[in-house]
């Protein structure tokens, strides 16, 4: 997922710095354990600046989910998997790209909105709903390629493009949980490899000798 790199530079205003602090700190230590002091220290702003922009930590959480949706949408929109003519190739290369960016520290590749959802789905319904909007908003971007792949490959499916798109996200979110549980991204890579195998079999695509790794571009295993 988007990380604080030369390609994703930090911007200067206090609100954005707080949102970027939330992105990084919450992925590292969770929503409940993150204090306003933590956020202000990481963002390099005062508490006065925090309360100028956010009523409390919950409103910050809602805004952070929306900011995550905005920035990740731009990140994925620029990815090279869109450049392939075959919609099935675009879908497979999307999943391979998701494997490729499972790299570095856990907090650098895990999902902010997935992390918050697991913690706050009962205690903070406003944050939960904002996280759902982010997750399902991204999921919806996969549906046109899935629908087009069904038509171009003449697949008569008893499932919907929306359900398959949601399944890809269920696998990815589960992969992040396994990586957190083991402290090792290998289990997450393995889960994405299985997702690639499943998609190839679902659409009748013959697996190559190297299986799903043929789609990966880079191997981090």
Image (tube, rainbow, N blue to C red):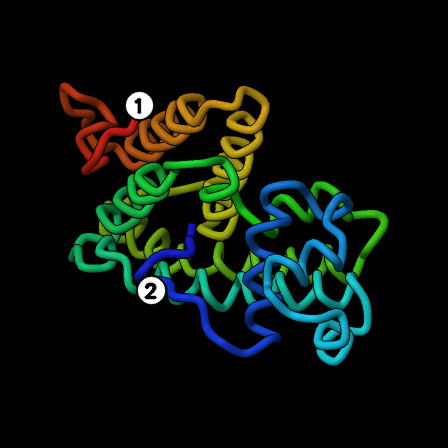
Q: Position of residue 71 (x, y in %)?
A: 46, 65
Q: Nearer the viewer, residue 207 or 217?
A: 217
Label 2 neighbour load within 10 Å: few <14, some 14-19, many 20+? few
- Which residue is at 22% across, 28% downward? 213
Foreground residue, 3 or 66? 3
- Quadrant position of residue 155: top left
Residue located beneath label 1 in the image: 221
Q: Secondary structure at mark 1?
A: loop
49 relative to 112 in the view: left or right: right
Q: Which residue is mark 2?
A: 77
Q: Earlier in the sequence, mark 1 or mark 2?
A: 2
Give the image location of residue 127, x and y in percent.
Answer: 73, 59
Q: Residues within 10 Å of mark 1 (few under 14, many from 20)?
A: few
Do residues under tags 1 and 2 come within 8 Å of each other at their CB atoms?
A: no
Q: Position of residue 177 (x, y in %)?
A: 57, 31
**Residue drawn at x 17%, y 21% as measured from the top left:** 210
For the residue pair 53 and 100, the one nearer the viewer reads as 53
């Amino acid at each position: 997922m988007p990380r604080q790199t030369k390609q994703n530079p930090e911007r200067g205003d206090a609100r954005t710095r707080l949102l970027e602090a939330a992105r990084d700190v919450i992925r590292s230590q969770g929503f409940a354990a993150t204090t306003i002091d933590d956020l202000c220290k990481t963002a390099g702003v005062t508490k006065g600046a925090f309360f100028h922009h956010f009523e409390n930590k919950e409103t910050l959480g809602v805004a952070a989910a929306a900011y995550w949706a905005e920035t990740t949408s731009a990140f994925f929109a620029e990815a090279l998997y869109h450049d392939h003519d075959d919609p099935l190739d675009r879908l497979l290369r999307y999943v391979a790209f998701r494997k490729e960016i499972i790299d570095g520290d856990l907090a650098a590749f895990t999902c902010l909105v997935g992390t918050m959802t697991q913690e706050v789905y009962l205690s903070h319904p406003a944050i939960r709903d904002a996280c759902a909007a982010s997750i399902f908003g991204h999921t919806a971007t996969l549906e046109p390629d899935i629908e087009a792949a069904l038509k171009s490959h003449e697949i008569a499916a008893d499932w919907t493009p929306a359900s398959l798109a949601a399944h890809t996200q269920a696998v990815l979110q589960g992969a992040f949980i396994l990586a957190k549980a083991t402290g090792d991204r290998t289990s997450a890579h393995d889960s994405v490899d299985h997702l690639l195998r499943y998609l190839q079999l679902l659409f009748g695509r013959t697996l190559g000798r190297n299986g799903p790794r043929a789609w990966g571009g880079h191997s981090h295993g």
